[in-house]
Amino acid sequence: MKVTDIKVYPQEIPLVEPFKIAFAEVNEAHTIIVEVLTDEGISGIGEAAPTSKITGETFSQAIENLKYIREWLIGKDPLYVGKIEDELNSMLLGNSSIKAAISMALYDILGKVSNKPVYKLLGAYRDHFETDITIGIKSVEDTVKNALKHVEAGFKVLKIKVGINEEEDIERIKKLRDAIGYDVRIRLDANQAWSANQAVSIMRKIERYEIELLEQPTPYWDINGLRYIKERIEVPVIADESVHTARDAIRLIKESAVDGVNIKLMKCGGIGEAIKIARVVEAEGLKCMIGCMEETRIALTAAAHVVGASKNIVYIDLDGNLNMVDEPASGGMELKNGIIHLPSKSGLGVELDREKLVKYKFSGDYKKIQL
């Protein structure tokens, strides 16, 4: 089997409502869907969600790199997924979301050829699991309203974005507990917005509200700050932007800086590296989370397959498509009452919707997208 072509579909999908975190606010999901074609008529699909502050690549750079990767990949055997992932890492520094898209598409092909869903190829552990749902930074009142709506829809875990206003963050958590009680778990994500001292001060004021975890409170480079926080609060500290690869995870573990790490396919560059991170963290006795960007069910399902093969991924945050007005794909993972169910179809189990690919095609200036 040989790769014959790569089709690229840049997409701009409106969001139901603006999504705000500590360093950005977005109104559309900008994502790049890729389709790898082969000479045996089997194709695979993947997705990239480049974000310059996290993946180190702009939308425009990602598109340009895909042109380069296309010429390099044509003629190669797509079933040699591990080798291709390794060679991509050697030839292209960073640019992890585009590598992730190619990885997803190749695993999709491998699963279709093997007639098995990807999570079974990776070593199946489970076929369903619970996810949280994320609430971006809003007023205290709107946060509570959104939380009640999500709880009514069946979600039992909420991830709350914080990091802009300290007093409002504290009030937000207090009012949330007043409204939803303690049967619903709460996770916090500061997206690098706090200093170490600030994080400790805030968390000591809200720890009594039973926070399940605190995600990336300090800037990605401040490993000493993460350790300082970990040593002074009871809530587990999870690294996100500080960890892209298995090597990053090992470094933070050796530094005793965190209680766990958040894996994102867009950060680590693909399914192979995601599995590697989960394994090395498990070997060290720590826990993993898996998260996402503003992604369609293509990338989310790929991440869900990783969860299905990994006992040690215990915190799941795969909700990136729920705020989209629509998406150019169907099938894949199924979400019911906060529980994700993996597909039984071979490969990723996701199908492209060609009409919607055209409907949401991005036709503007790529260079203006600097997420």
Image: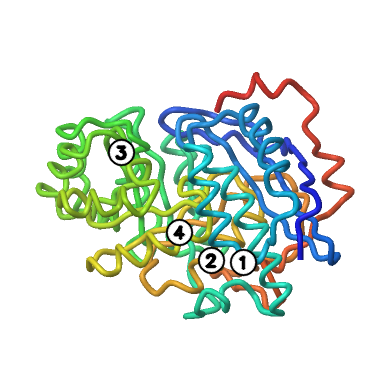
Amino acid at the residue labelled 1: Leu
- The amino acid sitting under disc 3 is Glu
Q: Which residue is mark 3?
A: 171
Q: Looking at this view, is 16 or 371 the one in front?
A: 371
Going from N to C along the chain, the mark reached first, 4 or 2, is 4
**Can you tell which of label 3 and label 4 is closer to the viewer?**
4
Callout 2 environment at 10 Å: few (<14), some (14 to 19), or many (20+)? many
How crowded is the residue under tag 3: few (<14 C-alpha within 10 Å), some, or many (20+)?
few
Foreground mark, 3 or 2, reads 2
CA gap, disc 3 and disc 2: 26 Å
- Residue carrying label 1: 335
Q: Nearer the viewer, residue 164 or 9?
A: 9
Which residue in the structure is indicated by mark 4? 274
Which amino acid, mark 2? Answer: Gly
Q: Which residue in the structure is indicated by mark 2?
A: 338
Query: From the viewer's perspective, is 249 left or right of 87?
Result: left
Quick one: SS at disc 3?
helix
Q: Secondary structure at mark 2?
A: loop
Identify the residue at image location x=78%, y=61%.
43
Dot 4 crowding, Cα within 10 Å, few <14, some 14–19, many 20+: many
4 or 1: tag closer to the N-terminus: 4
